[in-house]
Image: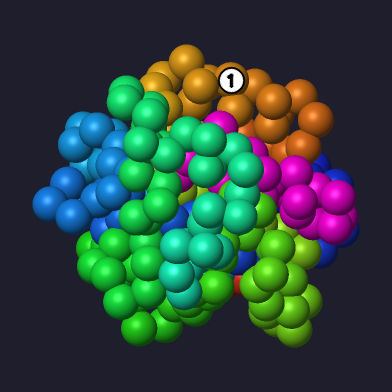
Amino acid sequence: MKSANNLGVDHPKAAVVAIDLHRGHLDMSVATMPTTPDVAARVLAANKRLFDWCRSVGIPVIHQVTSYRDVEEIRVNPFWRSRAEEPGNTRKNAMRHNIIGGPGCTVMPQVLDSRDFIVNTKKRYDCFLGTDLDFLLRSHGINTLLITGVNTNSCVLATTTAANVRDYAVIVVEDCVDSMDGPELHAAGLACIRTAFGSVMNTDEVMALEGLAPRKPNAA
């Protein structure tokens, strides 16, 4: 069994940072930047499995939800503005994505629990930028992040990079991330992460890490 100390921290204290597991990406009936239905189903099932285990062993789950007050908070980004309404581009609906009050700004119910934390001020790919995520993590003594969600090649990659430069140990949970931009960019994002920013493991490997869980799983 691999020890969690191999992550580079002497006494790991972990939390899940679940990125954008909201209806704006994963509910095909309302999503403005949807993944494919099969990606949504697979990611939700994998995250539910991981989260159920994490909650049972005392690892907190923190949901990051993108939400904008108005379109001006989106269109100030030059790249997003340049891609808006571009046919065939996965970000063509950027100017309509997750405006506060819309259905997209809601965590998918199958991965949400009353014990979870929600940070709903995310406005850019980096989950630390303009949010109180770092304060939440530091106030709970967290030094190790289990990163899940979408999209691997944008928000997951940017947040992993941001966590790395803040000296968190990072594990991206491979079966719990995916991308609306397709399998090649999903794989490219993981390659960048494992090369320079953090570990990439699947759920079984995470659950087998000795010393990661504060307590043994609850009995069934």
Q: Is residue 139 magenta?
A: no
Q: Is residue 13 above or below residue 29?
A: below
Q: Is residue 205 above or below residue 63?
A: above
The scheme the figure's colours follow is rainbow
Instruction: Where is residue 34? Give x, y as percent.
Output: 29, 42
Q: Is residue 214 above or below residue 210?
A: below
Q: What secondary structure is marked by label 1?
A: helix
The residue closer to the viewer here, 194 or 28, is 28
Give the crowd class for mark 1: few <14, some 14-19, many >=20 residues within 10 Å.
few
Q: Residue at (55%, 64%) from the top-left corner? A: 73
| Residues rendered magenta in the picture | 150-171
Q: How many marks?
A: 1
Q: Left or right: 91 with respect to 35?
A: right
Q: Residue at (79%, 56%) from the top-left corner? A: 168
Q: Is residue 156 magenta?
A: yes
Most frequent secondary structure within the magenta stretch: helix
Question: In the rendered image, which quarter is residue 16 located in?
Answer: bottom right
Disc 1 residue type? Ala
- Quadrant of the image containing the N terminus: top right
- Quadrant of the image containing the C terminus: bottom left
Q: Residue at (80%, 30%) from the top-left corner? A: 196
Q: Is residue 178 above or below residue 76?
A: above
Instruction: Where is residue 20? Give x, y as percent.
Output: 43, 56
Q: Residue at (45%, 62%) from the top-left corner? A: 71
Instruction: Where is residue 97? Give x, y as percent.
Output: 37, 55
Instruction: Where is residue 125? Give x, y as percent.
Output: 60, 50
Q: Check disc 1 and report the residue beneath it.
A: 188
Residue projecting furthest to the top: 184
Q: Left or right: 129 with respect to 27?
A: right
